[in-house]
Amino acid sequence: MILGVTGGIATGKSSVTDLFRKKGVPVVSADALAREVVLPGSSALSAIVQRFGNKILARDGTLDREKLAEIIFSDHAARTDLNRITHPAIARLAETTLAGLVQAGAELIVYEAPLLFEAGAENRVDKVLVVTAEPAEQKERLMRRDGIDAATADQRIAAQMPMVEKIRRADFLIDNSGTPDETALQVAALWPELVVSLNNAPIR
C-alpha cells in the first residue's frame, strides 16, 4: 500500500513522515524529487530559466528556490506556469521510484507530497494521511522556518488548497499542533488502522 502524506505548508509533514521512517517504512519525498528534476542540465531547469529568466539561478547555476518562491507565491499565473513545467517531470520520477519499491516487495510505502491534491496526484497512492496544525501555530512555524514576516506567511498559506478541503479528502488525520511526543502517540494509534488498510489494499 502506498500512503500519501500531505497537508498545509509548515504543518509538520516531514516530522510525521520521519516517524514512519523510524518504523522501517520506505519514504519517497516529492520535495526531494522536485529538487532532482531541476538539477543543472535538466530540461525542467532550462524551461524554468526560459520562463523566469537567469535571476532565479544561484551563482553555481543551481535553482535559487527562495528567489523563485518570492515570484510564484505572489503571482498565480507564474505559479501555474512553474507547476506546468515541473509536475510532469516529478510525476514520471515518482511513479518510477514507487514502482521500484513495490517490485522490491515493500508492503507499505509513504509518499510525502505537500501538493498531492494540487498536483492531481491522488492516483499515485492508495490512502491519504493529512497532517494538520492550528492556523496560528502553522503561521508561526512558517515564519520561523523561512525567516519571513507575517504578511508573506499569510500569502504562502493562502496560495495552497484550503486545509478544510484537504481534511475533507483525507482518509486519516494527524493533528501536529502539539508536542513531538503527542504526535508520535497519534501515529502509534493510527498504526492498527493502517495494518487493516494494508491488508485490504489493491495489488499493484
Image (cartoon, rainbow, N blue to C red):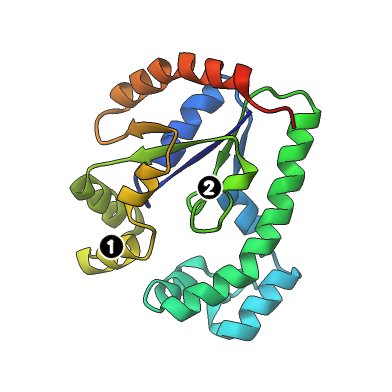
Query: Residue 115 location, x and y as percent?
Result: 49, 54
Secondary structure found at label 1: helix
Q: Residue at x 44, y 69 (%)?
A: 69
**Which label was assigned to residue 128?**
none
For mark 1, what is the residue? 153
Q: Is residue 37 visible?
A: no
- Quadrant position of residue 190: top left
Residue drawn where x is 18% and y is 49% of the image: 136
Characterize the local packing of mark 2: few (<14), some (14-19) or many (20 or more) Cα atoms within 10 angstroms.
many
- At x 51% / y 74%, what residue is drawn? 80
Eyeballing the image, is 107 above or below 46?
A: above
- Residue position for label 2: 113
Quadrant containing the C terminus is top right
Q: Cβ–Cβ below 8 Å for labels 1 and 2?
A: no
Q: Nearer the viewer, residue 95 or 22?
A: 95
Left or right relative to 124: residue 135: left
Residue placed at 30% from the left, 49% from the top? 164
Mark 1 nearby-residue class (10 Å; few <14, some 14–19, many ≥20) = many
The picture quadrant where one finds residue 61 is bottom right
Secondary structure beneath label 2: loop
Q: Position of residue 185 (x, y in %)?
A: 34, 18
Q: Position of residue 107 (x, y in %)?
A: 68, 22
Above or below for 96 versus 21 = below
Residue 49 shows in this picture: yes
Amino acid type, residue under disc 2 in the picture: Ala
Q: Nearer the viewer, mark 1 or mark 2?
A: 2
**Which amino acid type is marked by label 1?**
Ala
Furthest toward the top, the residue is: 192
